Structure formats: C-alpha cells, structure tokens
Amino acid sequence: MFNKVIVSEDFDSINIAVVQALEALCIPQIQYAKYCDDTYLKIKKAQAENDPFELLITDLSYKADHRESTLNSGEELIAAVKKIQPNIKTIIYSIEDKSYRIKSLFDTLGIDGYILKGRNSIPELQKAIQSIYTSDEKILSSELSHVLKDKSLLEIETYDIELLKLLSEGLIQEEIAIQFKNSGIVPNGSSSIEKRIGKLKIYFKANNNVHLVAMAKDLGLV
C-alpha cells in the first residue's frame, strides 16, 4: 500500500472523511491542504527532501476567498505537480460529472483515477486507491465507466469546441466567421461553418442548434 499520500480539498468535512478513509487503509503518512498552492509546496518540499508523496488526491474546484493563489484548480495543481514529479499517482475526487472534461483529464494530465463525490463514494475511493497501487489500470466511478469508452468523445476537435462555445454565447454563423478570422482559425468561411454545424448536429443527433448546444453542455464540451 502507499506509504505517503497528500489530500488537497478546501472543505474540512471532506478532508476529514478522506483522511479517515486513508487511515482505514493503514497508510502511515497522510497530509492535507486546503489550497492548491500549499499542496504544491508540500509536494515540492517532499521531493527536494527525497521523501516524495506517492499519491495525490485532489478536488477539481476550489472556492475563491480573500487569499491570492497561483494555482486555482485541481487541474492546474496536477499539471504543475507533474512537471516536478511526473510519476506521482493522481486521483481526482470531485462532483464534476461532465464526460468530455473527465476524459480530457485522463488524456492530457494522465490521471490515474476519477471518483465522483456522493453518498457512497468513500468506499469507492478506497477501492480506487487499492487498485491504483497494485496496477496501472485507469479507475473510474461505476456511474462514469462509459467515459473512456465513448467513441464520440474521441473525434471532437479543438475547432469544434470553439465553434460550440461561440454558439453557446448566442453568436450567429456570420459572427462566428468574423471571430474565427480575427483569431486565425480555419476554415472560417460562413459556408464552412454552416457545414461543420450540420455535421455536429448529425453526429450528436441534435434537432437544432439549441439542442446541439444543450448536448455539448451535458458532455462538458462548453
């Protein structure tokens, strides 16, 4: 089992519950922090002292307060930590359930597990920790098991996401074309954008643009 684990979570009640779950697994060294910056500094210090943390468990979202922070999300925290300790195991423990965002965390940050917070999530978190310790398998909450298998999420490009984002902001095709031209995004002709929107509607089986945007939001694309 892991010997040294750090938990990053801004709510005391959740921090306590996660720490108790780790103690039940007989993990000898457990630390926690309420801010991403503090978590990062603890990990950096442990690394410098040749006594690194083996596992980071972090939330995705942190409530802003009076304190200025350099790292403001679990995503930013993991990205920063991976630069100084690429081999650290990482689990995200969050209420965020948007499929595309979750998949992108596995693809871009190489996280090892994603557990959805809920009434019975602590036992699932414990199982995830045990599985990640013994294997390289990527672990997901049972209700999110489809995320890494959803082929529709594999074929969405950055261009599509930007297009959907502008549609969600209420821009019409001509306005999107101007935005794309100003940003150097191609293709940026109105007809090309119209065709792309048509393909997206077919792809997601959306009845119209409003339905398309709603589906994109459900997936966490925008």
Image (cartoon, grey):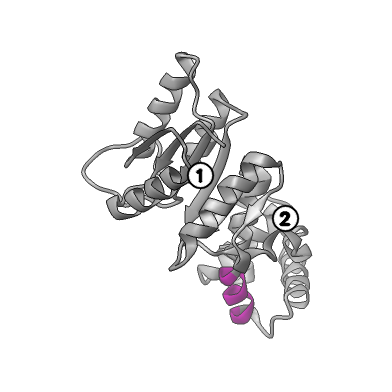
Residue beneath the point at 47% across and 35% down: 5
**What secondary structure is the magenta-colored segment mainly?**
helix
From this view, report whether residue 132 is shown above or below residue 155.
above
- Identified by mark 1, the residue type is Glu
Name the residue furthest left: 66
Considering depth in this image, is 24 or 187 the residue closer to the camera? 24
Q: Position of residue 182 (x, y in %)?
A: 60, 50
Label 1 belongs to which residue? Answer: 75
Categorize mark 1 by other alpha carbons within 10 Å: few (<14), some (14-19), many (20+): some
Considering depth in this image, is 160 or 204 the residue closer to the camera? 204
Q: Earlier in the sequence, mark 2 or mark 1?
A: 1
Residue beneath the point at 56% across and 27% down: 83
Judging from the image, what secondary structure is the residue with disc 1 in?
helix
State the extent of the magenta-drawn residues as a range. Answer: 210-218
Residue beneath the point at 64% across and 76% down: 212
Q: Is residue 115 visible?
A: yes
Res 194 → quadrant: bottom right
